[in-house]
Amino acid sequence: MPLRPIVTLPDEKTLREVSKPVATVDSDVKKLWDDMLETMYRAPGIGLAAIQVGVPRRLIVIDLAKDGEEKKPLFVANPEVTWASEAQSDYEEGCLSIPEYYEMVTRPAEIKVRYLDRQGEAMELHATGLMATCLQHEIDHLNGVLFIDHISRLKRERVLKKFQKAQKLGKL
Ligand code: GNR
Ligand code: NI
């Protein structure tokens, strides 16, 4: 089952789940990462959390390579932010679980993240720029947090209503 369907709003029951750590990086984890990566490339997107394919595990894939560039997938398990800069940065975010909606989000400009890599080894990564933004966006997913939680309540409720209404009308 390589390509998996992406969970979108209004399915908050799934998207608000808090994902559980993986005990070990085993073949099941690697298979899920591979399916997630394929699903993300196809979407296309630059990051994906396991809960976005309905699996409540603390697993992420990211690839910031542009079209035509060599792919460089990053496989992340059980990430923990160990440091965040005081300096903030603004980036216009989108989410595969909130199709066709984009809004500016302010987050720490740089972070350090401890995680397990594809070999199951503990790693620490210092992320800046788009990588810092994307990692924070994905780690939020593991905690049931969406980027619309970082914007105004008015905008958030408008988006949630739009997706609820679209589903009622059979348009999702
Ligand atoms: O593909 C994606 N693009 C993106 C752009 C700005 C900030 C975050 C992202 S992540 C998103 C894919 C996604 O929904 N990951 O959870
Ligand atoms: Ni997302």
Image (tube, helix red, strand yellow):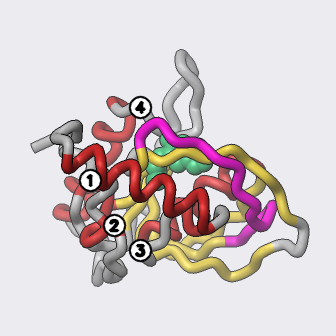
Query: Which residue is label 4 attached to?
Result: 44
The CA distance from mark 2 to mark 4 is 19 Å
The CA distance from mark 3 to mark 4 is 22 Å
Query: Which residue is label 1 attached to?
Result: 7
Are circles 2 and 4 on residues that touch, CB within 8 Å?
Answer: no
The amino acid type found where label 4 is placed reads Pro
The amino acid type found where label 2 is placed reads Leu
First in sequence: mark 3 or mark 2?
2
Give the crowd class for mark 2: few <14, some 14-19, many >=20 residues within 10 Å. Answer: many
Query: Which residue is label 3 attached to?
Result: 144
Quadrant holding the C terminus: top left
Q: Which residues are magenta?
A: 99-112
The amino acid type found where label 1 is placed reads Val
Please tell me which residue lies in front, 113 or 155.
Answer: 155
Residue 135 in sight in this render: no
Are circles 2 and 1 on residues that touch, CB within 8 Å?
Answer: yes
Instruction: Check disc 3 and report its element: helix, strand or loop.
Output: loop
> Measured from the top left, where is residue 29 in percent x and y?
25, 64
Query: Which residue is label 2 attached to?
Result: 15
Seen in the picture, residue 146 relative to 41 is either above or below; the reply is below
Residue in the image at 79% along x and 53% along y: 90
> Measured from the top left, where is residue 8 in percent x and y?
31, 51
The CA distance from mark 1 to mark 3 is 13 Å
Are circles 3 and 2 on residues that touch, CB within 8 Å?
Answer: yes
Instruction: Check disc 4 and report its element: helix, strand or loop.
Output: loop
